[in-house]
Every structure is written in C-alpha cells, then in structure tokens.
Amino acid sequence: MDNILIDQDRVRFSGSGSLVPGNTAYGFYDSDPIFVDECYKGMIWAARKLGYPNIDIEMIDINFYACYEEAVNEYGKELNQFNIVNNMLVFQGQQLSTLGSVNGRNVQGMGLNQIILLAKDYGSETGTGGKLTWKRGHVDVQPGVQDYDLQALWANVTESCNRMEIKRIFHERPPASARIYDPFSMTGMSYSNILQELGFGAYSPAVQFLMTPIFEDLLRMQAIEFNDMVRKSAFSFEIVNNVVRLFPVPTYGYKMYFEYILEKDRTETGFSPSGSAGNIVSDYSNVPYVKPIYGQINEPGRQWIRKYFLACCKETLGMIRQKYQTIPIPNGETTLDGAELRQEAQTEKESLLENLREMLAQAGKFNQMEKQAEMTEQLINSLKGAPLFIYYA
C-alpha cells in the first residue's frame, strides 16, 4: 500500500514543484529570472485551471515546465518566421559575420538591391544592361544573294561553333534626316536646288549657309519616309535558326551588322552565386534570428504564451489520461476525459496560432504602409471641412 501511494505522488501534481532551472527540457531560458518566476507561477495557475485541488492532475512539475518552455519557443518561432519573410529581401546576400543576431534590432530597407539584381536578367534580354553583354558581328552581303547563315559565317568561325542567339539585325534604309540634303536623292532637297530656288545659284555652296525653319526639315523627312513606304520595296528580313533572308534582294555589296549573345553565356551568367558558403545569408534557413529573450517580451506576448502553455498542458494531460481511458473503482469504473482534452487543446492551439499570425501580418511593412495611406486620405478628407482663415493687412 505504501508503494502505491509513493507511485501516485510521483505522477500527480502535489501543489508545488522543484526549482525551474535545471528542470526544463532544453534550459533555453533558465538564466532569465523573469522566465523562472513566471514558469513556476504558470505551473500553479495551469494546475488550478485544470481542476486542482478538486481533482487529481496526472502531471508533475517537469511536465508543466516543458509545456511552458514549448509555449515560449512557439511564440519565438512564429515571430522569427514572420520577421524573416518580412525582411528577406533586406537580409539576402548580407554577410553573416557583420549581421550578428538581428533579434530586437530595427531592420530598415525594402530590399531594392535584390530587386535590381533580379531585374538585371530582364535588362540582358532587352539590351539595356544586365549580366549579358551583347556582341556585334557582320557578314558581307553579296548582290543578288538573299540568304545568309549567320551561324556558319560568323559563329562557327569567330565563336568556336558555340550556338548564338541573334538579338538585333541592322538592315534598313539610311535615316531620312541624312537624305534631306543628299544631292543624289530624288526626294530630298539638295544644297544646289535650295540655293537655286532662293536665288543663290551663282554662289558656291561650300561657303554659303542657309537657315530654314525646323518644321521644314520635319516635313521633308516625313515626305521621304512616306515615299519609301509607298513607292519602294520595304527593307525587312526573316530569320529562322540563325539563317536570315533579306528583302529586297540586294543589288550591291555592303556589310550587314547584327548583335547577338551566346546561348551558353545565358546559362553561365543566369546563375551567379555570390559570397562563400556559410558566410552570407543565402535563404530562409540561415537568417540570424535566435530564440527570444523572455524578459523583453511585452505583456500581450506573455499573455499569448500563457494561453498556449495552458493548451499544451491540456494536450499533455489528455495524452496521459487517454493511455488509460477507464479505471476501476469500487463497485464500477470511471471514464477519463483524455480524448476530449486533446481535442480541446488542439482547437485552442490552432486558434491562438491563427490569431498571432494575423496580428503579425497587420504589423508587417506592407500592411502598415496601407494603413498609413488610408490615414493620410482620411486626414485630407477631414481637413476639407476645416474653415480657411482669411488674412488681411
């Protein structure tokens, strides 16, 4: 009989407990006197919430301490996860050695440097910068020959047979602005024609200067381009597998220039890791957030921890009681509420986590900027009804 009573005392809450330091599962917060105090008080509070001393609680001090430590860890995990996601663009690529622990520090910035780095890939494709440099090549166009294999004529010779991708081909008429005063152009106005029209035909055009209004140049350029479009064959081309076909059929020889990139360059420069492994923030896994300092958690946070702690206690007690769903008593048996406690605990934990995540999201940068914009709009609307003062001397 004495042995049975000893075993019962070992597995039932006695109304008090041993010291907290050294009896928590991990000892993460044992050196924090505020945690030690609240962990012990939390044990008394949770036991009473669970029915002690009216009914026996099949948990002892170390069970309560483990649940309280778990609640603090869960709060820190949710907080750190939110901060990592909220500031990932700011942290990524930063030196771990210079960052140190970022808990409790004000993280400023919007990650513009990462956005610019990502945008460089788009700049490479449009020729406006980026990681790829567009190269330039040329082929000799022969009269009467329309088709030119740029891969064979240029890349196989110059780029060691590496596959190239053509980005731009320069095959078009000279600009109209260069043909306005071309003496060999039948559409523009040559120097000699202009001078003859204005009575300066007897003078040498090499030493005479004629100033005309800018709109006349614009009208002449428009006339030249419109004439080319209606009366002449359009300069164009088709390109398939780096074989270009020119239109119209060339009637004289010239060099046709083009810009290109090598396909292997896109692959090689598209992935460009920076920094040495283990020395920079690379992803979610190594952003330097650590466990929270319990003494610095504010009262709303501690209250959340207490509620989550109570839910963890219910879950633990439910697991213990569910091990033996029925126990014999004199003249019958009684059924324990293990399953109900576990279900209730699970529901409470999910509700608490959802509430915490919602509150963290509302405190995020994006939502705060939205709220600030709404406040500014409401302030402007409010000031519209304010009387304006009229000042007079």
Image: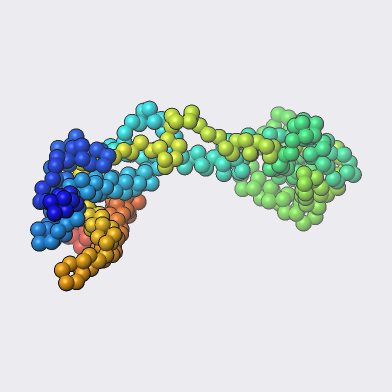
Query: Relative to the observer, which residue lies in front, 391 or 338?
Result: 338
Q: Residue at x 43, y 38 (%)?
A: 92
Colouring scheme, one of rainbow, by chain, secondary structure, one colour: rainbow
Residue lying furthest bottom in this view? 331
Residue depicted at 57% across the width and 44% down the height = 122
Q: Would you say residue 273 is visible in this rendering?
A: yes
Q: Is residue 290 left or right of residue 94?
A: left
Could you tell me which residue is drawn at 48 percent across and 40 percent down?
116
Q: Relative to residue 155, is residue 328 depicted above or below?
A: below
Name which quarter of the figure residue 388 lies in.
Answer: bottom left
Q: Position of residue 54 (x, y in %)?
A: 10, 62
- How far from the left and from the top, in percent, is residue 291? 29, 40
In the displayed structure image, the side of residue 254 where residue 191 appears, left or right: left
Label tally: 0
Q: Give x and y (percent) for residue 31.
A: 19, 34
Task: Please tell me whether residue 350 is drawn above or below residue 62 in the rendered image.
Answer: below
Q: Pinpoint residue 16: horizontal percent, then vertical percent.
A: 10, 48
Q: Is residue 173 left or right of residue 369?
A: right
Using the image, determine if residue 330 lies above or below residue 306.
Answer: below
Q: Which residue is painted at 22% across and 65% down in the image?
A: 327
Q: Measured along the vertical axis of the image, is residue 167 above or below residue 316? A: above
Work out whether residue 17 or residue 231 is closer to the camera in this orientation and state it: 17
Q: Nearer the viewer, residue 236 or 300?
A: 300
Q: Quadrant of the N terminus?
A: bottom left
